Amino acid sequence: MHNGFPMRRIGSAAVAGAAALAVLAPAASAVDHAPVRQQTAAAQEHVSAQEGAKKRLTVKGYVGYLEAKGTPAAKATLRSFRKLSPAQQTKFVGYLQSREVYSAFLGALKGSTSTPHLRKPVAYNSDVRFVRDARITKKSSSSRTNTRITYTMTEQIYGIAVTSEQLWVSYQTKSGKVTKVLGAGASVSNVNAALAIRHGKVERRKQGPGVFAETTVHASPRYPGFGSRIVKEQRVDAGWKGTWKAVLRNA
């Protein structure tokens, strides 16, 4: 009698364990066969959850973010990031989540539409620099000329681009005078895991003898140590006697 009772308990536990495995098996199978898109989203959520608990972005977390993002820009950044020394990698992720660095990410340029390209890197320190870049293209037909001005601000850490914020405006001139705005747009390229960055609505208008385009850029922190979000304004003015000016500034 005493020998049979333990065996019955073991048998019951085995049955319960088998039932639990039967319940878990379909779930495991569903994960194994989930679409790649869902797996990528799960990886991003996993990285975010782990790093959010630590309240700081780490080197390991940044590598996981780039691997999960999987875009050509993220892959290129990951290759370059892995070439850095461990000390540089630690400083790199520190710069990514520095409020002081992103607040200082500002710049202005001005020039003539006769110069097709103007580029000006400005050092924040020996590791970080902000690159101001303007490109001008023209297409002429009869007495009309269509001009497009594109202004891009890029933050680089150890020569690796982590954030680019771009605004462009296109307009038409006749006999040297602006007749109308043809278009405008903005874009953001971002591989900074510490910040979610997006641009707002783009406003464009003919104003006096020239034209302008402007937008806002919103940077929302993914980690509490950064503080509140930062909003920037980006604007391009053009058309005054063949000149233009552009700026990215804190709102």
Image: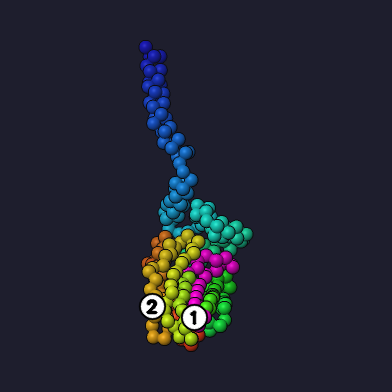
Residue 26 image-quadrant placement: top left
Q: Would you say residue 22 sits in the magenta stretch? A: no
The kind of secondary structure element at disc 2 is strand
Q: Is 72 displayed left or right of 1 in the figure?
A: right
Numbered badge on residue 73: none
Taking the view exactly as shown, the residue that stands out farthest to the bottom is 241
Whether 74 is drawn above or below 117: the answer is above
Q: Does 173 appear above or below 27?
A: below
Q: Amino acid at mark 1?
A: Arg
Spatial CA span between label 1 and label 2: 19 Å
Near-viewer residue (11 or 135): 135
Q: How many marks?
A: 2
Q: Is residue 234 visible?
A: no
In-front residue for pair 84/3: 84
Q: Which residue is mark 2?
A: 205
The residue nearer to you, when weighing 33 against 112, is 112
Magenta range is: 142-165
Q: Residue at x 57, y 77 (%)?
A: 117
Image coordinates of residue 162 in percent, x first then y, are: 52, 65
Crowd band around label 2 with a 10 angstrom C-alpha radius: few (<14), some (14–19), many (20+): some
- Tag nearer the camera, 1 or 2: 1
The 10 Å Cα crowd at callout 1, few under 14, some 14 to 19, many 20 or more, is some
State the image coordinates of residue 113 (x, y, percent, origin top left).
Answer: 53, 82
Residue 137 occupies quadrant: bottom right
- The verdict on residue 144 being magenta is yes
Q: What residue is shown at x 44% (from left), y 50% (from top)?
A: 41
At label 2, the amino acid type is Arg
Q: Which residue is mark 1?
A: 144
Main SS of the magenta part reads strand
